[in-house]
Amino acid sequence: MKRNIHEEIELQDCPYCGGAGLLEEENGWSWYVTCMDCGSRTAPSEYSGTKERADAARKAAALWNIGKVVRGNISE
């Protein structure tokens, strides 16, 4: 049985605004986390095969949880 990666990863609140983070996959080559409130996000965590996919998702979550995030729009 295949596990849902979203169920095993816990995300902290956004380091900028305190909003909820969302783990997203981009076209089958990378994962990133984005804030659903302010749009801040991590850099993409790339993978090249199914064996690396879950590790890339965990890496994106780890970057988010330690605050390695790029702010979406500083003027807001």
Image: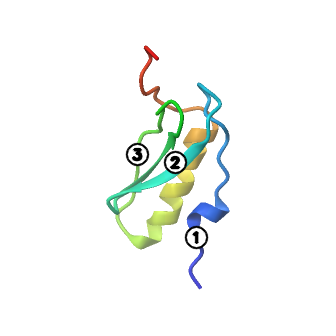
Other residues around mark 2 within 10 Å, as few (<14) / some (14–19) / many (≥20)? many
Decide: marks 2, 3 in contact (CB < 8 A)?
yes
Name the mark nearer the viewer: 1 or 2. Answer: 1
Q: Please tell me the numbered disc located at residue 44.
A: 3
Residue 67 pos. (x, y %): 59, 32
Residue 45 pos. (x, y %): 43, 49
* Alpha carbons under labels 2 and 3: distance apart: 7 Å
Q: Residue under label 1, please give it.
A: 4
Q: Please tell me the numbered disc located at residue 36.
A: none
Name the mark nearer the viewer: 1 or 3. Answer: 1
Farthest residue toward the top? 75
Residue sitting at 51 percent across and 56 percent down?
A: 57
**Res 13 quadrant in image:** top right
Q: Residue under label 2, please give it.
A: 60
Residue sitting at 60 percent across and 75 percent down?
A: 3
Judged left or right of residue 25, residue 8 is right
Q: What's the residue type where badge 1 is placed?
A: Asn
